[in-house]
Amino acid sequence: MGVRKSIFDSREEKSLYHHLKSVWGDKLNIYPNLPFTKIFDIETLKVDSRTKSYLLKTNVDITVCMKDKPLMCIEFDGISGGFNRKGRYIQRKFDKERKRKLELKLQIAQRDHFPFFVISYEEEERIPKHTHLMLIDSIIGQTIATKFFKEKVKNFRDSHQLSKVNEETFQDIVMQLEAELELEWDPIAKKVTEIEAFLMRKGLIKSWNYRYLEKPSLSPLKNLSDTSTLVERAKMLERVIWIGCRVVYTTIKGKTGATAWVRNIENEYVSPFIIAKNSAMLTALYKVLRLFKLDFNLFK
């Protein structure tokens, strides 16, 4: 017996917690190692005694809360290097028991449509590499923005305001709301907007373009009007591990670009395509700043 030296199970969990506190501490409460039963009511679950005993004892690495209300959970999987997509846990290094336990947590969270992420070192990558922001910050921001977006749209519908506007106006309202929430909550998207607006005001960038990438790569669609081809591509996308985006800015000094990769973490709250594009844009914009010898500290 004796007192543990740390409440964290690993150095990586400790580092992740302190990073999230530094980025999100002014908006959200970040809790380490909360008991699973503090977040989920397991009494209504029809599980055997062994499973229930495990759920009563297990913790969640990181829980993100608005005041005392849980918004999302994060498990750091340094051992198996895993991540989750649409409620499924995908391991880089197979561990049967770890897979069983994490999939159980994911299934319970998915039952209540609650955001629950398994991440590893890949999601701790800094974007760009010399800044303080990580991919996990964009995952958190996109998740919260989507949660609030769904709530606001539901409230709009429930308040019967929908009958006062036509479909086109409603779609405009929805798109504006979605953009506003992304800029409010996703720090990478916010920084992209700030830097891009600054460079455009200075007349330093003229245009930009992007294209998505996948690993393993998918064969191109031959006929976009062929429904069966689109269905097959959707099935193939389920097997994709990495979603990438290549962004190129055309400046008055030529073209500058960057590529960003995100593991295929798609669920009802997060799109890896959006995170990959925003990450590639930010990395490319920092290259543009360097090209024109502009001070990065303007955008801290």
Image (cartoon, rainbow, N blue to C red):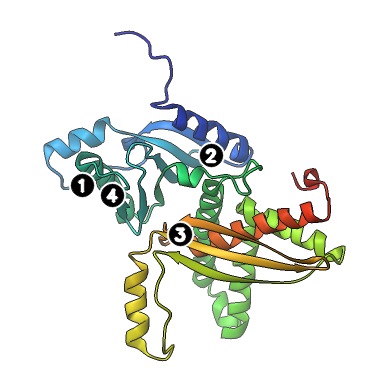
SS state under label 1: loop
The spot of residue 52 in percent (x, y) is 19, 37
Q: Which residue is mark 2?
A: 67
Q: Are marks 1 and 4 in contact (CB under 8 Å)?
A: yes
| Picture quadrant where residue 70 is located | top left
Q: Is residue 267 left or right of residue 90?
A: right
Badge nearest the viewer, 3 or 2 = 3
| Residue 38 or residue 125, whichever sits in front | 125
On screen, residue 139 above or below 272:
above
Local crowd at mark 3 within 10 Å, few (<14), some, or many (≥20)? many
Kind of residue sitting beneath label 3:
Tyr
Kind of residue sitting beneath label 2:
Lys
Total marks placed: 4
Kind of residue sitting beneath label 1:
Leu
Residue in the image at 71% along x and 58% along y: 285
Q: Which residue is mark 3?
A: 269
Q: Which residue is mark 1?
A: 45
The mark nearer the N terminus, 4 or 3, is 4
Residue in the image at 49% along x and 38% along y: 68
| Residue 70 or residue 246, whichever sits in front | 246
SS state under label 4: helix
Q: Are marks 1 and 3 in contact (CB under 8 Å)?
A: no
Report how far apart the C-alphas of labels 1 and 3 lie in the structure: 24 Å
Q: Are marks 3 and 2 in contact (CB under 8 Å)?
A: no
The spot of residue 173 in percent (x, y) is 62, 74
Local crowd at mark 2 within 10 Å, few (<14), some, or many (≥20)? few
Residue in the image at 42% along x and 83% along y: 221
SS state under label 3: loop
The mark nearer the N terminus, 3 or 2, is 2
